[in-house]
Image (spheres, rainbow, N blue to C red):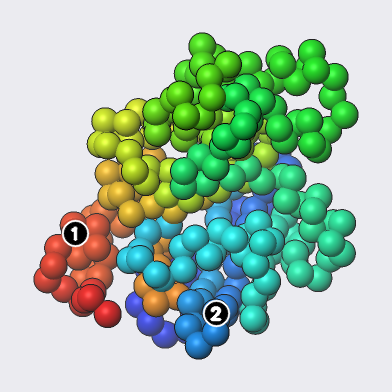
């Protein structure tokens, strides 16, 4: 089936997703999702599936629901209608205890790293292990230092968040997102606030860790260079719907006027200021 779709029924954009995951069937499916905040309708029947072991980049203009999509996937927001399936489970048809267990299979990198200012880098990264496991401190240290080494921060373990750069905060947040060995990692604008060089370096880290980890990564970004560099698949959201989904190479070669305009950053095309 052609993965591209413009308008029409939202189910036309569903890609076929193999159920093999990272050896565990890791997969997320969002179907016909509607969500409003007061009178503002954010999601308008969004449907999308995420391929296991791949990096899927979610692009779209501001206010189209990209971050809201992530919050639905991790079970922080309940849809007005539609379904969110994680590892084959509709997360709003299971008990809260089961939903909490599903959340532990996610890692999340927030826009600013979301580090605790009262903790040093090491304790920030160790926090999920101390909260959600009974591991002894020796094992926690082994895991934390392994993750810090992966993101190039092993020498910064004792530094406070206000003593490190924005790029280092992002990498520390990435390390924290990985310590529970998640099957799905969500990135909410990981390049926000970073200069082009640090953005490129962070992208290198994401690609390197994904090459070793083989999890399902979902990256929300405005940065076209990030999308071009890290993506296996690209989903383009506009007005609460998926208007394009496909392999990254196909997206950047697309003749679709909307896709071409957005990925080129052109002012001329169907996408306006509204």
Tell me: 223 left or right of 147.
left
Q: Is residue 168 above or below residue 260?
A: above
- Asked whether 167 or 83 is in front, the reply is 167
Q: Mark yes or no: residue 73 visible.
A: yes
Instruction: Tell me the residue at 39%/28% (across/down).
Output: 165
Task: Determine which residue is flagged by label 2.
Answer: 37
Q: Does 150 sit above or below residue 230?
A: above
Q: Position of residue 197 (x, y in %)?
A: 26, 30
Quarter of the image for residue 244 reads bottom left
Query: Farthest residue in the bottom direction?
Result: 39
**Residue 201 at what x, y percent from top left?**
35, 28
Of the pair 150 and 124, the residue shown nearer to us:
124
Say which residue appears at 46% left-offset and 68% top-offset. Answer: 65
Q: Position of residue 261 (x, y in %)?
A: 20, 65
Q: Quadrant of residue 76?
A: bottom right
Q: Nearer the viewer, residue 54 or 237?
A: 237
Q: Quadrant of the C terminus?
A: bottom left
Q: Left or right? Give the position of 172 relative to 7.
A: right
Image location of residue 174, percent across then percent down: 54, 34
Determine which residue is flagged by label 1: 265
Relative vertical location of residue 129 with respect to residue 144 in this rendering, above or below: below
- Tag of residue 161: none
């Amino acid at each position: 089936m052609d993965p591209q779709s413009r308008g029409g029924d939202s189910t036309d954009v569903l890609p076929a997703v193999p159920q093999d995951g990272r050896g565990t069937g890791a997969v997320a499916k969002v179907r016909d999702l509607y969500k409003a905040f007061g009178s503002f309708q954010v999601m308008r029947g969004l449907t999308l599936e995420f391929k296991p072991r791949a990096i899927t980049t979610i692009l779209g203009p501001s206010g189209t629901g990209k971050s809201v999509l992530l919050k639905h996937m991790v079970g922080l927001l309940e849809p007005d209608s539609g379904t969110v399936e994680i590892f084959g489970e509709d997360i709003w048809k299971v008990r809260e205890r089961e939903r909490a267990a599903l959340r532990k299979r996610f890692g999340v990198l927030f826009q600013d790293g979301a580090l605790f200012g009262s903790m040093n880098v090491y304790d920030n990264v160790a926090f999920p292990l101390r909260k959600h496991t009974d591991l002894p401190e020796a094992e926690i240290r082994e895991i934390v230092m392994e993750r810090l080494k992966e993101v190039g921060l092993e020498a910064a373990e004792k530094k406070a968040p206000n003593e490190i750069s924005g790029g280092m905060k992002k990498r520390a947040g990435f390390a924290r997102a990985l310590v529970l060995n998640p099957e799905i990692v969500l990135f909410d604008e990981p390049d926000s606030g970073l200069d082009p060089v640090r953005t490129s370096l962070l992208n290198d880290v994401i690609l390197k860790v994904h090459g070793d980890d083989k999890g399902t990564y979902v990256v929300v970004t405005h940065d076209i260079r990030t999308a071009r560099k890290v993506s296996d698949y690209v989903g383009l959201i506009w007005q609460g719907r998926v208007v394009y989904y496909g392999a990254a190479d196909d997206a950047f070669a697309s003749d679709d006027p909307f896709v071409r305009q957005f990925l080129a950053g052109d002012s001329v095309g169907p996408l306006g200021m509204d």
